[in-house]
Image: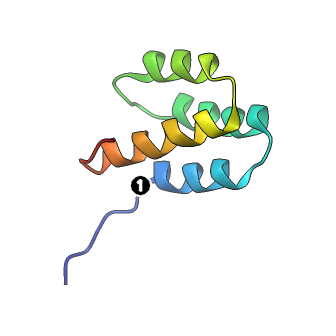
């Protein structure tokens, strides 16, 4: 059976999806990203600032998680 590494990104994205408030969800993700050594940190943070709806944030987070896992929408 293949074991998968569960990233902290997965955990924070699940929490952000569960948060109905756009600003609170975005803040959670930004705090997490700031504490990591992700190569494209500034690009991600800038993109998060441009998102104006919770549904668009959820889509962006889903796509980010898929990209991390090697799949992209």
Residue 9: x and y in percent read 48, 48
Residue 1: x and y in percent read 19, 84
* Residue placed furthest toward the bottom: 1
Say if 53 sits above or below 20 in the image.
above
Residue 31, by quadrant, is top right
Say if 72 sits above or below 47 in the image.
below
Q: How is the image coloured?
A: rainbow
The answer to which of 2 and 18 lies nearer the viewer is 18
Q: Is residue 49 left or right of residue 64?
A: right
Locate the C terminus and report the quarter of the image it occupies: top left
Residue 67: x and y in percent read 32, 42
Q: Quickly name the residue at label 1.
A: 7
* Residue placed furthest toward the left: 1
Q: Residue at x 47, y 34 (%)?
A: 36
Say if 56 sits above or below 11 in the image.
above
Q: Residue at x 60, y 35 (%)?
A: 57
Say if 22 sits above or below 4 in the image.
above
The answer to which of 26 and 3 lies nearer the viewer is 26
Q: Residue at x 77, y 31 (%)?
A: 23
Residue 24, by quadrant, is top right
Residue 6: x and y in percent read 39, 62
Q: Bin the neighbour count of mark 1 within 10 Å (Cα to Cα): few under 14, some 14-19, many 20 and up.
A: few
The number of numbered discs placed on residues in the rendered structure image is: 1
Q: Is residue 53 left or right of residue 44?
A: right
Q: Helix, strand, or loop for circle 1?
A: loop
Q: Residue at x 58, y 24 (%)?
A: 48
């Amino acid at each position: 059976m293949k074991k998968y590494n569960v990233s902290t990104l997965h955990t924070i994205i699940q929490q952000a999806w569960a948060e109905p408030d756009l600003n609170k969800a975005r803040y959670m993700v930004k705090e997490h990203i700031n504490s990591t050594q992700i190569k494209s940190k500034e690009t991600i943070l800038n993109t998060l600032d441009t998102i104006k709806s919770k549904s668009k944030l959820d889509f962006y987070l889903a796509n980010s998680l898929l990209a991390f896992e090697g799949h992209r929408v």
